[in-house]
Image: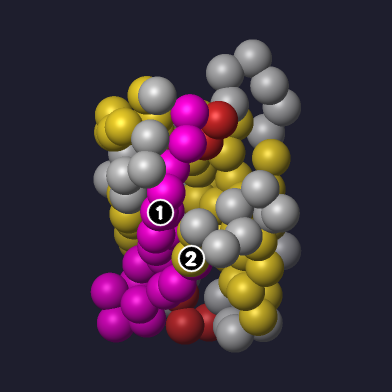
């Protein structure tokens, strides 16, 4: 099983990015009940950003509510994180995960840097 995250980059405050996490191997995103995105800002602990639980319940950290949207495309076996109105405090390495088969599978992370 592999998770390939992409879409990070350097943007200015107020701009948008869409992160993608392609899941390959023996996992079908359509069968996953717990998936999402974490981030780790520089010098800080990893923090949960957004999740899809039980295939339809979307949950967001307070610091991204109204700005970020998590979604998935079963046909493409991909999980997305649409990020709008990015702020410098959103600078972090963003990693996707799926929980399946009684274990968590992680992507490698993609860097998002927001300049003021």
Front one among 43 and 23: 43
Q: Is residue 75 magenta?
A: yes
**Residue depicted at 43% across the width and 42% down the height:** 86
x then y, percent, for residue 113: 39, 27
**Badge 1: few (under 14), some or many (20 or more) residues near its Cα, within 10 Å?**
some
Q: Position of residue 69 (x, y in %)?
A: 48, 65
Element at label 1: loop
Q: State the residue in front, 103 or 108.
A: 108
- Where are the magenta residues, as a range? 70-88
Task: Tally the marks.
Answer: 2
Residue at left offset 47%, top offset 36%: 87
Residue 15's place in the image compared with 9, above or below, is below
**Whether residue 57 is visible:** yes
Mark 2–mark 1 contact, CB under 8 Å?
yes
Image coordinates for residue 64, horizontal then vertical, percent = 59, 52
Query: Split into 4 quadrants, where in the image is the N terminus?
Result: bottom left
- Residue in the image at 37% along x and 43% along y: 14
Q: Residue furthest top?
A: 43
Which residue appears at 64% of the width and 14% of the height?
43
Mark 2 crowdedness (10 Å alpha carbons): few <14, some 14-19, many ≥20: some
**N-terminal label among 2 and 1:** 2
49 sits left or right of 15 in the view: right
Question: x, y percentage for residue 93?
Answer: 48, 31
Task: Kindly identify which residue carries mark 2.
Answer: 69
Measured in 3D between alpha carbons, the distance from the residue under mark 2 to the one under mark 1, in whole angstroms, is 9 Å
Q: Secondary structure at mark 2?
A: strand
**Residue bearing the label numbered 1:** 84
Please, is residue 73 above or below residue 92 in the view?
Answer: below
Residue 50 is inside the magenta segment: no
The structure's colour scheme is secondary structure
């Amino acid at each position: 099983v592999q998770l390939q995250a992409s879409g990070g980059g350097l943007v200015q405050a107020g701009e948008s990015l869409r992160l993608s996490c392609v899941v390959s191997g023996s996992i079908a995103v359509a069968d996953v009940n717990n998936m999402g995105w974490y981030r780790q800002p520089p010098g800080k602990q990893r923090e949960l950003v957004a999740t899809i639980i039980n295939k339809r319940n979307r949950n967001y950290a307070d610091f991204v509510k109204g700005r970020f949207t998590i979604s998935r495309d079963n046909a493409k076996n991909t999980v997305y994180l649409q990020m709008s109105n990015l702020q410098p405090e959103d600078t972090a390495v963003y990693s996707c995960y799926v929980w399946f088969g009684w274990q968590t599978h992680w992507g490698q992370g993609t860097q998002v840097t927001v300049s003021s």
